[in-house]
Structures are given as C-alpha cells and as structure tokens.
Amino acid sequence: MSPLRQALVTLAVAAVVIISTVWFARTTGSDEQTALRGTAGHRDVEVVVTAAVGDRSVEIQLSDPAGVTEVRLEPAMTEMGHAYPPLTATAVDRGTGRYRAETHFDMAGRWELTVVVDDDAGTERAVLPFSVTP
Amino acid sequence: MRDIRWIATLLAAVATLLALDASPAHADGAPAGTDIHVSQSLGERELTVVLRRVDVVPGPLRVDVVTHAGSPAGTLTLRLGAGVATVRLGATPGTYGATLRVDRPGTQELLLDDGSTVASIPFVVPAVVLTTAETLTYYGFAAAGLLLLGALGASLLARRAWPAHVATSGLAAALGVAVTAATLSRPVPAPAPVPRPPVTLLTSSEPAGDGVTLVRLSFTDSASGRPVDDLIVHDAAFVHLLVVTPDRALRHVHPVRTRPGEYEVHLATPQPGHYTLTAEVARSGGGPQLLRSPVGFEVAGSTSATAPDTAQARVSNTAQAQVPVTISGRRAGEPTTISANFGEADLQPWLGMVGHLIAVGPLPPDAPATAVQDAQVWAHVHAMGPRPDIGAQPPDESVADLGPEVSFTHTFALPGRYQLWMQVQRNYALITVPVVLEVGAPR
C-alpha cells in the first residue's frame, strides 16, 4: 500500500468510527414518551404522555377496571399554582382499564397530571408530577 | 514478523491499561440517593421509618423501622408495588427491619399497614441519567476495546498488514472520541427548584375511642385549591404537627399520608378542652412553611377556664432527673439563649437535630387555653449537632452521643410571658421540658 492510500484508509476508518459512535450514542436512550406511575386508592395508575408543549393524547391504564364509573384528568401547572379545567377520559376498550384524554400543554415547566377515579366506593386520586419540555 | 510481535505487545499493554480504567468508570456517578428518614405517628406508635439508599435498580430496598418508648409489640406489613414484607416489632424500643425489592427507578409508594391504618410514604428512586458526553465516553471506550481485540487478532493471524492497520486506526479514533467526550463531560445538573404557591391547612377531628381523637389534615394549594401532593421530607417528616393541650403541654407528632394531600393522626386526648394545632410542612422547591390552624379542635367535657402555668422547669418523663435550665438575655429585640443540661452525653438525634425548642407568646397572665392559638409569636428553634461531611450520611438514632448541654438562641420580638418546650431524645424516649420565660421590654 502506498503511503497516500494508507493515510486515506486511516482517515476513512477514523471517520466511520467517530460518526457511528456519535450516532449510536445519540440515538440510544432518547425516549419521547414519558411513563408516569402512581396509585389511586388500591389501583395502580400508569399514564403515558409525550411531555412536550402542544396538543397531546394522554393514555391512562388502571390496574383494576372493575366498578369504575368515571375517569377524569386534571392538568395543573405546579409552579404557577394554575389548574386547568378537568377532562373526562374516554374508555378505549371497555373493561380493560384503558382510557384516553386529549389535553394541551401550553408552556414548558413543572406540571402535574391528576388522575381522578370514581367508583362505587368513592373518589380516589393519583397525582403524577412531570416536566414539560419546550 | 518482529514488527508484528512488537505491535502485538504494545496493543496488549494498552488493553491492560483500558481494562484497569474500566472499573472506576461508575465511581464518577453520584451515589444513587441517600437514606430517607421519615417519622410516622402510626396508630399509637411513634415510628422512624428509614429507607436505606438503593444502589442497584432492580435491587433490594432495606427498610428499618425504629420504635420508641411506649410503642407496643406487634406486626407491621410493608408493601411496595406487588412486594409484601412483614416486620415484627418487639416490645423494646429499637430497630426492626425487612427487605423489599425495587423494580424500577422513579416515584414509588411504600405502604405501612398496622392493621387499622395504612400510611403511604412516597419516595423517589433516582434514575441514572447519562449526558450525551457520558454516553459517548462509554461507547467510545467500548468500541476501542472491540477494535483492540480486532487489531490484536489481525496482527497475529492476518497475512496482510492492512487489517491491523484499519483496526488500529479505528482504535485511535474511538479512543479520541472517548477521551474528548470524557474531558467535555459535565454531570447532569440537578433540576432547579421551582417556587410553589403557599399551602392552606384545613383540619377536622372526630372521637376515635376512649380518650383518643382522630385528627385529619388536608393540605391544598392556595392558588388552585387542588390537593398538595408534593410535600417533601424536612427535618425527617412530611408533616410536623405541634399540638398544645388544654393544660398547655406540647405534643409533637407526625401524621401519616393516607391519600394525596390528606394526612391523619390518632392523638391521645385525655383532657377535655381546646387543643391548638400548628403544622410545619415543606413543598418541593418551596421551603418550609408554618401553618397555624385558626380553629384547632375541642374535646368535650368540663374544663377549667384558665390553663395552669408551668412555673418552673420540669420534665414530662418522670423517670428523668430535674433538668437545670439557664437563660441569658431575656430582653425583646435581643438574642436570648436558653440552655439545658441533660447530665449525660447520651442523647440521640431526634428529627436530625440535637434538640428542638418551641416557643409561643406573649401570653397574658391567666390566659385561657385558646391564648396559645392567638399568640403572635410561634417559634421553632433547632439545636444542631456536628454536621456530617458533604455527601456523608448523617448518623441515625442508634448513635447516642449528643449533649449533655443543649442550647437554643432566639430573638423574641415582643416582651411578655412565653411558654417554651425543649425536646430531646434519650433511650428512644422523647423528653419534653416545659419552661416559662419572661421577656423584658426592649432597651
């Protein structure tokens, strides 16, 4: 191999390694959806949401769907102490404990999503704090 | 051939260095959390629940339950997610524990069930967050290690020179990426605390058996009116509830969380009359707040019109000797120092401090029991012990080496008569020393 080809091979390999390492490091671990977990009374609540400013669909999963009469979502911005009107979540599949609500995050910062579960025994809440990015 | 051997030896040396470098990599990260000490007045027991720091997720969570004098034997059920553990509490004060399993990072809820009340302790298991630079460092070194093996193999086995050449070029590039990223890497900054609106305290009470009152506290956000569920542990409790009884004794209890923003405590209320309630809480990022209930609660029965003055210092626990108290200052607007000598240097830290002093006043002579509720000054002063080094764990209650001198300094804004209570812990028993202090007019 001529010295020029050796140098070219060295540069090409270095470029490939640097680009692939940076690309791999950037793509690993980036997760757009945020999963929030809490409990409302005896039920486990899991909420999956894209925590960024804009119109967002909030997926709610309850561990025990039996007896649930209504599920509501109360968004609030904690640092401002600013509460938004409650939203009624609609059941995705009856009896599976899956619900969905549409909301809008109008600014970045610390937020709380409160999942309110009504059942025959009363009302229970799970308060789930998270950060909304710009 | 000699050249190839030489290159192989050099690469082996580099491989050894890389292998040595690999082990301290995780030591760069901060320890994953610290122990959490939470005082819980659960039923008739005063417990300190210690959640030991979680090092690995998923991994074990050790929960130690410290009982105090007067705490009956029994069992306590701990629940975390689907995991259940039982703690058998003995009749002697001390530490009893169990091990649960944490399966994910993030907010968790530890449930304590004594058979009649379920207390919930929310806590956070920190997630390991890597910056891009840190991720690049790890992947860079990993790629360098793989390429190093490739270069070794190529230099020993390949007939041509170019495979070893390619692998060593890649190795150099990967090392360059890793070292550059490591040099540029900064730890993830902690999220800046964000201010929160003040808290509104609502209280209600109902009789719960002979001489016991169930007191419910409800904390709401003063701006939105929503339940406040971001109370953090400060001075080893979510809520410090200070109760002044009709005979002007102080009770310092730690209500347990039952649902978001709702706390409750069973209080022994043997005397009829008016009980004054004051709560200390801290919101996440909001700093501690003093919440004085404007109503308190009443226990029915015939009462005397005025509260008896505790004219001189006495110790509520009769097993203890008299505690000499010295006071210097005693003038409004100037620092007053109140010192007590507890005899032996065997005091235990209580709520992370050597001692606590609660001062209420000025109280008019022959004041009714409700005067404490209307008093202008309500102070909570700490006597601090030696602080642990930064990053070190503070000693828990099993270390009994504090005292014997415990002193508090406070500037009383107004002249008049103040009711003071000093609180320290010895032999897992809380000692409350009431003192009446006359503060003179300012110079």
Image: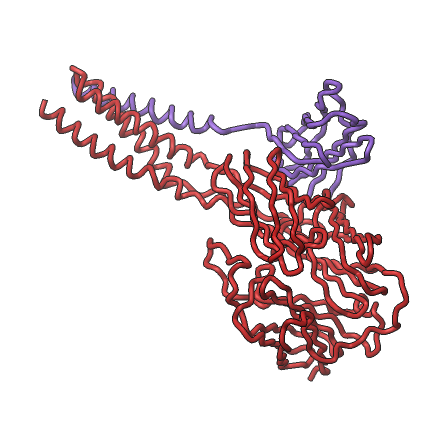
Q: Is residue B105 above or below residue B345?
A: above
The picture places residue B11, in percent across and down from the top left corner, at 21, 30
The residue positioned 58% from the left and 68% from the top of the image is B383
Count of numbered tags: 0
Pick the residue in front: B292 or A5.
B292
State the residue lying farthest toward the left. B2
User: Residue B174, located in which quarter of the rendered image?
Assistant: top left
Q: Is residue B175 visible?
A: yes
Residue B115 in the figure: left or right of residue B235: right
Name the image colouring: by chain
Query: Depth check: B45 or A114 in front?
Result: B45
Q: Quadrant of residue B138?
A: top left
Chain A representation colour: purple
Residue A134 seen in render: no
Residue B79 pos. (x, y %): 63, 39
**Residue A62: horizontal and vertical position, in percent?**
70, 28
Horizontal relation, residue A67 to residue B405: left or right: right
- Placement of B99 over or under B401, stated as above or below: above
From the rendered image, report the letter of the chain displayed in red: B
* Residue at 39%, 43% in the rendered image: B27
Taking B335 as reference, is A127 above or below it? above
Quarter that holds the C terminus of chain B = bottom right
Figure quadrant of the N terminus of chain B? top left
Q: Is residue B366 above or below residue B20?
A: below
> Which quadrant would residue B110 be assigned to in this image?
top right
| In-image side of B207 versus A15 (left or right) | right
* Nearer to me, B177 or B7: B7
Picture coordinates of residue B173 (x, y %)? 30, 29
Q: Residue at x 30, y 29 (%)?
A: B144
Q: Most extreme residue toward the top, as rendered?
A: B159
Kindly give the residue lying farthest to the bottom in the view shown. Answer: B443
